[in-house]
Image (cartoon, rainbow, N blue to C red):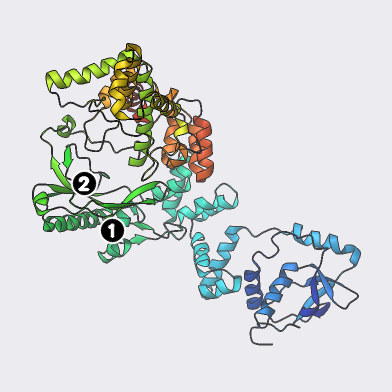
Amino acid sequence: MNANTPQLSPNLTHVVPLNLLVQSKANVRKTNTKEGIEGLAANIEAVGLRQNLNVRRLEDGTSEVIAGQRRLLALQLLAQQKKIPEDFLVPCLEVNAEDAHEISLAENSMREAMHPADQFEAFNQLVRGGMPVEDVAARFGVAPSVVKQRMKLSSVAPKLLKLYRAGEMTLEQVMAFTLTDDHKKQVNVWEAAEDRWDREASAIRRALTPNMKEANSRLGRFVGIDAYEAAGGVVVRDLFDERNSGYMSDEALLDKLATEKLEAEAEKLRNDGWSWVKVMPLSETNFWDGTYYDELEPQTPAKFKIEEDEDGDEVEVETNPGVYSAEQMASSGAKVVLNYQGELLIQRGLVERSKVAPSSTSKEKVEKPEWSARQTEELMNQHTSALRSALNDNPHIALAMLAHTMADEIFFHSMEARLVEVSVSSHDTNRQYPYAVVPTPEECSAQKGMTDKQSAWQKKLPKDDEKLLDWCIKQDDETLTSLIVFCTAMSLSTITSKYGYDRTEQTQQLAKVLNFNMADHWQPTAAGFVSRMKKGQMVQALKDVNLPDVAFNVEKMKRDAAVKATATALAGTGWLPAMLRPANDNKKAKKDKAA
């Protein structure tokens, strides 16, 4: 027996060698019997076996353990680790066979687990008594970080711990209060909370860190903890944050470092030869500054790859920027911005248009986009398909649209935005490469409808385009009109590129004439669009249809459950993202929000 061998008390009924003890079928504990065995073994090694095993002697000379099965497994583990001998003498109390089941049931059901508050105060007392954190961790079979966390919990105000013991506060709330050791501040935050929202753990953390930035925020990720601390910044650590990122206490310093880093990137671009470089304000997460630009094509195209962001959304990531000539760089500029994820984005080859959008002179703050570029592309492609279908069903309006476009070009030489591109072009709303622009087309009934109509026309038309004119001449006016209407509808596009003309006004005008409502054509599903929404977008959508209680629950759910709950709640409500709503609905929503 070595120095680590547990010291046993001598006043026991009798002792049995460990290698003669076996598990009993009479033991009522069947589930999770091996859970926590390593921790129990560490504790037995440190302080000894303080409770005997209840056994029943068998005819073959062995003894089966009626009560104390986990202690037996822990001792066997110590023997396997060569920390005790295989025939280690175990203190046992022999019981009658007829009492075995009842004794096992009593031991496993009558004991009560130690309250967490008692446990972390006990840990704290051991450490304050001089025992190193590592020794406490070893004795109880846990990591040192766990001991530190539980000790930190004991620093919460006694008044709050009393509420926790009484079941009036959750462990998560207690954990949130450990961000400060100021008991008065902790109690003030709790008592100042007016409703359950203010007493959520996240709300408590915000109240305790009003002028701090999370190290995992976009600015925190961009600057980095090392650079921030090197500049004299202080990080308030949250032991219960799985990322252990903490909070940056000096917001002004963080802003200064982020701005300097962006300016350094801008200076590199200036040295590369760009005629001008604009750094977007830290408050902005995209390139929009109210001015329209044309974007020069690089001599060697940029390369991209598709990756998933933190929310599981697919995003395009630039792997190699395009190569521009010296002449191109001398006549154009670049922009630098920090996006929502805290990533540096650079836009090159920009030439300001002579025509500036009216909003560029406005002092009003440009609203940040609600939906990502990929989500917007998906929605607007389905919107285009649905509006095409509605236009195809109304020949008079389709012909009017065609006449307007042709006359505007011939008689007015207008360069205004047009919905119908008579050149004629028609972008594919079912495009699959390099990714499916609409991953779940079944959500939009009109998408399949227009695809079927196109297939039907394809069968009517000659296979050789050289025979098309002759075919058209032979058709009656009704067939030609139908074909013109369909082609006009297919050339319609409501999609506005990032630097293209805005088609919103004409889209809304056409939708009003057609009495068009996207909700009649599109329904988001759990397997489709809802699965690609971020948690915040789900919550807002539910609030849009006046379901605040569901929104509250969804905010607390794991992602899969939140997706299903959101899709179920939105079904039949007619909810649409703002960009797809009729103009009057958006005006009403803005008015209600302002009120």
Residue drawn where x is 16% and y is 29% of the image: 358
Tell me the amino acid under the disc marked 2: Pro
Q: CA distance from mark 1 to mark 2?
A: 15 Å
Compared to residue 98, the image places residue 402 above or below, namely above
- Relative to the observer, which residue lies in front, 227 or 400? 400
- Relative to the observer, which residue lies in front, 545 or 101? 545
Q: Which mark is residue 223?
A: 1
Which of the 4 image quadrants contains residue 454?
top left
| Residue that numbered label 2 is attached to | 281
Residue drawn where x is 75% and y is 68% of the image: 69
Compared to residue 253, the image places residue 91 above or below, namely below
Tell me the amino acid under the disc marked 1: Val
Compared to residue 235, the image places residue 443 above or below, namely above
Helix, strand or loop status at disc 1: helix
Q: Is residue 50 left or right of residue 355?
A: right
- Relative to the observer, which residue lies in front, 92 or 33? 33
Q: Residues within 10 Å of mark 1 (few under 14, many from 20)?
A: many
Q: Can residue 125 be seen from the camera position used here?
A: yes
The image position of residue 352, as x and y in percent, is: 13, 40
The image position of residue 404, as x and y in percent, is: 22, 17
Helix, strand or loop status at disc 2: loop
